[in-house]
Structures are given as C-alpha cells and as structure tokens.
Amino acid sequence: MTAGLTVASATASPQIQETAAVPAAAGADPLATPEETPEAEEAATPDATQEPEEVAAPEQEEDPTPKKADYAGVVDQNGGLIAISIRKGKVVGYFCDGKIEAWLRGTAADNTITLEGKDTLVTAALRGGKAQGRIEWKNKSWRFSAATVKKPSGLYRATAQVRGARVVGGWIKLPNGQSVGRIMLGENSGEPAAAFDGGVQEWYGIPLTPQDPDQFIDAFLAPAS
C-alpha cells in the first residue's frame, strides 16, 4: 500500500509543475493590464505629427441682385419718370420731369439700390420685378415704382461737344410710349427734349445719338480725369 502511494505521488508532481504560472518579464508590472503597459499607452497617444483634417468653409450665398436689369416708371406726386439700369453691380439712374433732372450713380447689393446725384438721393428695394423706393431732391421727396423694361423702353443718354461746351441729353421711355427728357448745355442751361423716337435727335442743328446703358455706363461711371 505504501509503495502504491509513493508511485502515485511521483507521477502527480510533474502535472503540478506544468500548470505553474509563467514568470513575468523583467521590469514589467505583474499587476498591469494590457491597456496600462507602455506599448498600449504609446498606441493610444495621438501622433503629434498627424495633420488635422481640413474643415470646409461654409459656402457663401450668392447675391440675389440681378446682374443685368432695366427699370423705368412714374414718380408719384411729381409726374416725372425715373429709370435705373444695373450691369454686374454697376448702377446708373436718371430722374427727369422735363423741368428738373438728375443723373445718378451708385451700388446694388442684396436686392437694394442706393444712387446719388446732384442734390439727389435715390434708395430702392428690388422685388417682384420692380424697383420701389424714394427720391429725395433738395427739400422734396417722392415715392416711385419702376417695373422691368426692355428696349426700346428704358434709359438713353447722348453727349456732344459744341464750341467747347458739353451737351448732354437724357431720355426715359416707357412701354406705353410715354417719354420725357432734357438737354443740357453745360451745367446751368438746358430745356426739355423732344419726345424720344429712338433715332438721332436734332437739337438746334446738333445731331445727338442716344445710347443705351450697355454703351455708355462705363464711360459715365469712370472717374473724372
């Protein structure tokens, strides 16, 4: 019986040794979890040399103001006409009732127009195919509504030199045939222009060739030399 126990003990020992824990590597914390090892910390640390992802800038909304448009209409409580033309942000305008006139220049953005001329300020909003706003001339003020128009309606301008004096003619024509204009000799002398018929205008034997805004806007808006 004793011999049998001895043999059994001898055969069981190797199995106990095989299941013993493997010694930890030198310098390692036997209690550290895989996440706490130096290798795991290095893997979790972001690469400082990695470039940040580019964030796309928000797209700017396009300006709703028309790139090209012509407006013309009647000035309330005055009876005169006003015309406004837009060409890629450039704006020219003309107000005339036959007795007084004002050539205007300004800006258009966000469907809003601001024009200035001698003793005159025009502000208008663009909506529904119309320019609606107010004219301030000296100490007077009138409202207006000008619808979009197409040639031969709209704004026209003609210039000439006579004996060293500058002649400037302006006309506005509405789709119903109504027109108004004025011809100035210099800055202080002028008179109402004949009804606009679209052709060359004769003024005391002087031929004046009216141009539409496409033809004169750049020269009109150019800085005086």
Image (spheres, rainbow, N blue to C red):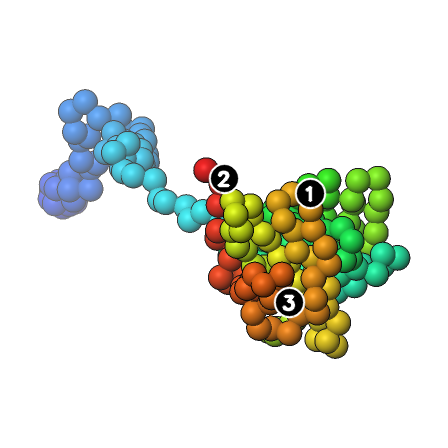
Circle 2 sits in a helix, a strand or a loop, which is it? loop
**SS for callout 1:** loop
Q: Position of residue 93 (x, y in %)?
A: 64, 54
Residue position for label 1: 188
- Residue shown at 78% from the left, 44% from the top: 137
Left or right, residue 80 beside residue 129: right
Camera-side residue: 166 or 173? Answer: 166
Q: Quadrant of the N terminus?
A: top left
User: Foreground mark, 1 or 3?
Assistant: 1
User: Along the horizontal axis of the image, is 103 left or right of 46?
Assistant: right
Report x, y in % for residue 41.
29, 32
Mark earlier in primary sequence (1, 3):
3
Q: Is residue 87 visible?
A: no
Residue placed under numbered mark 2 in the picture: 224
Q: Pick the residue in front: 2 or 14.
A: 14
Seen in the picture, residue 190 relative to 68 is either above or below; the reply is above
Question: In the figure, 191 relative to 138: above or below?
Answer: below
Q: CA distance from mark 1 to mark 3?
A: 25 Å
- Give the spatial CA distance, label 2 vs label 1: 19 Å
